[in-house]
Amino acid sequence: MDAATGHSEEKHVRVEDDPLVRGHGRYIADAPLPNQAYAYFVRSPHAAARIVSVDTSAALKAPGVVGVLTAQDMAGVGNLGRHPPVPGRGGKSLIIPHRPALASERVVHIGEPVAMVVAESAAAAQDASELVAVEYEETTPVTDAREALRDGAPQVWPQAPGNVAVDWPGPNPNPDENARKVDEIFAAAKYVAQVAQFNQRMVGNCMEPRGATAIHDPASDSYFTRTCSQGAGAMREGIMAIMSLPKEKVRVITEDVGGAFGIKTGPYPENIALLVGAKKFRRPIHWMSTRSEVFLTDNQARDIYSEAALALDEKGKFLALRVRNVGNLGAYVGPVGANIPTANFTRCLPGMYDIKYLDVSAKCAFTNTIPTAPYRGAGRPEASYILERVVDEAARITGIDPIKLRRRNLIKKSAMPYKTAVGTTYDSGDFEPILDQALALADYDGFKKRRRESQKRGKYRGFGICCLLEHSGGAPIESAKLSFPGNGALLLTLNVQNTGQGHATVFPRVIAQRLGIPFETVSHSNGDSANELAGYASVGSRSAMTAGHAIVKAMDTVLDKGKPIAAAMLETGEADIVYRSGNFEVVGTDRRVTLFEVAARAAEMKKRGEIAEDLDTKSTTETPLAYPNGVHIAEVEIDPDTGRMTVAAYTAVDDCGRPLDAMIVQGQTHGSIVAGLGQALMENVVYDSGSGQLVTGSFMDYAMPRADDVPAMRDALYDVPATTNPLGVKGVGEAGTTAAIAAVMNAVADAIPGGAGNRLDMPATAQRLWEACQRAKQ
């Protein structure tokens, strides 16, 4: 057994790795087509401006130019802004302004595309783009959500007075009555802890930027696009809706993807413009984003300001929680962007804690910034962060040790399933042993000694904890297909996209183990909308839960269909057939036929018209949410003379349900922790408040975590299988990001004396830490 994970040391090779490390991957730029042209986008240099004119005449005369598209060419293209309904106060709902593929009358954020130049080479297209003359009339931008909601702020959209996209009253069916009840609890409470924290804006920065190749077939008037996405089906659905096309007119292919994390779920303006251009110019058009365009065009993340208050009785029992959010949607409504500070955030509450009353509401604001949308967590890190910061504040004002206070308020295992005050139900969980295991793994008992050793060297040392609970699953519908192409092979086809999670390793192994067949006989396919598999993208830690459920159902159906065929082959009754270790057997005998022999016979019988279906099976399932949870602990050391901080140690104990592959779970955990460390320590999008210009538009100004920023990690699993799906999995891809920010910032607050670090916002840069340390000295 592995002492760190608590699981078998049996190692499995990830089948995805060999072709990728050998350079045999198929990313967007790896498949040029004959007669392919290249696109480059002319983008707005202003955050807010009226477009007076667009002159493309000089660009059209440039060497190698095929043509130029502007908004006039976008006839028939609908609104790129798509979002599920979000109810607001007073019967109002989420306002969704029209988002064009190419701006026509005005631009509302820096980098908004205005024209697309198409040429024989990428360099020629870029050169010609500089000849497109766009005359702008600048207007006053607003970039901060709280400023946007103030009286007199510049208006982004006339249909959204006060820049309010939606004023969400919370999940309670009677929000006003619920708020009054919570107010009464607060008024009578012995202690009230209050914090206000800003979850700063971030850029996802995938290793492979976005890109696409678009083709139009004039014979069938249909479109084909090869693009990096988190699900070809979800991408096609978005394109169909925006361009008013039936599904048979659009095909999306996605092959290898160099990182996604929520950023590559649906179509962007570039995807649509490429398709329009492919039809107009009658040739394939390819576009690959530059790193600069990543900063200017990719959906950004976070940017939520939260105020939280926690009411406690004299013994430190949590009585009620109140949270008020202000979410910055950016200039347009990004894909499910308004769900992040509202429903996604709220479904994480009350975390691991038994809090009977919650009052949560949010205002979502429009600003002249790049739209925000899901990125590794999408409301989960924000919820966990504000909850764990207010719990630490409660420990400070009550004088109760932070760990004892948390332990005192944990939901008991005996309370499962636990119905929360926000309407969700935790199906499973056993929180106190996870806390104990994390404290032991972090050597909590030895922390005082380590702190004294740091003090001798003139350093501050702090210990921070985060008890995290999040929801995984999201969109419940998902599909899988099992087919038997012959020669003793089984093909698994999925709708969810493998973007680094190891689908081609994990899911075939699940099938091989459950069916008792060699792993090598099972292969994996994904990334083609023509497979017609219902479901959604690989987001929200949902793939193992939802696709896994569909795979199990498909396997059961395969065996049910195979049983009567096997009985006929073995000349016995169906009741005498059992399936075991890859074979259909006659009970009590050595007579058997293999699964693949039965599949081959079924295919022959279907071909002869003797049966309606062979063993090829497509299944669709609906899977409820699950609730991954865990305890993460960060230990930091700060030099008060320089503000330099190191994360000296990091410990994580996670309950992701039943792990399907411990190695991949560990990799997902480590990767998501590093993403959280990046936010806690350094990542920060900054806009100039006067001009709306992006100040942090490159890696020169936007810091990313490197290897020497990451400590050695001690991690383990505590498995409590979910009851919401047959594999018992809960999801793991976002837990580290969700937990790390609170663990680190609570450690910072613990490290700096006199409470000088209690109110620090992320990122904990050297300057901010140095200033806090100077206040502590005073």
Image (cartoon, grey):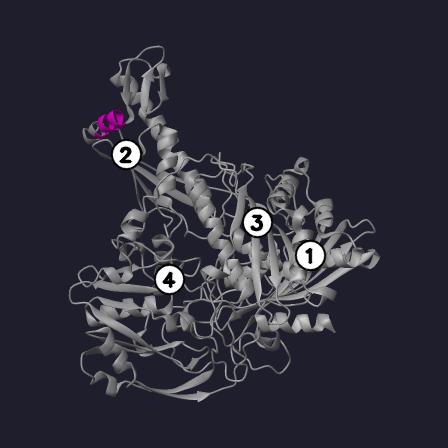
Q: Is residue 200 left or right of residue 26?
A: right
Q: Which residues are magenta?
A: 596-603
Binning the other alpha carbons within 10 Å of mark 2 as few (below 14), some (14 to 19) or many (20 upward) gives few
User: Is 458 contained in the magenta span?
Assistant: no
Q: Nearer the viewer, mark 2 or mark 3?
A: 3
The amino acid type, in three-letter code, at marker 4 is Met
Disc 4 marks which residue? 207
In contact (CB < 8 Å): disc 2 and disc 1: no
Of labels 1 and 3, earlier in sequence is 1
The residue under label 2 is 521
Q: Is residue 322 above or below residue 76?
A: above
Q: Nearer the viewer, mark 4 or mark 3?
A: 3
**Residue 227 placement, left or right of 721:** left
Viewer can see residue 112: yes
Tell which circle, 2 or 3, labels the residue nearer the N-terminal end: 2
Q: Which residue is mark 3?
A: 651
Q: Position of residue 41 (x, y in %)?
A: 32, 76
SS at mark 4? loop
Q: Position of residue 690 (x, y in %)?
A: 54, 84
Q: Which numbered dot is residue 58? A: none
Q: Residue furthest top?
A: 588
Q: Which residue is mark 1?
A: 452
| Category of crowding for the residue at label 1, using alpha-carbon neighbours closer than 10 angstroms: few (below 14), some (14–19), many (at least 20) | some
**Mark 4: few/some/many CA within 10 Å (<14, 14-19, 20+):** few
Q: Earlier in the sequence, mark 1 or mark 4?
A: 4
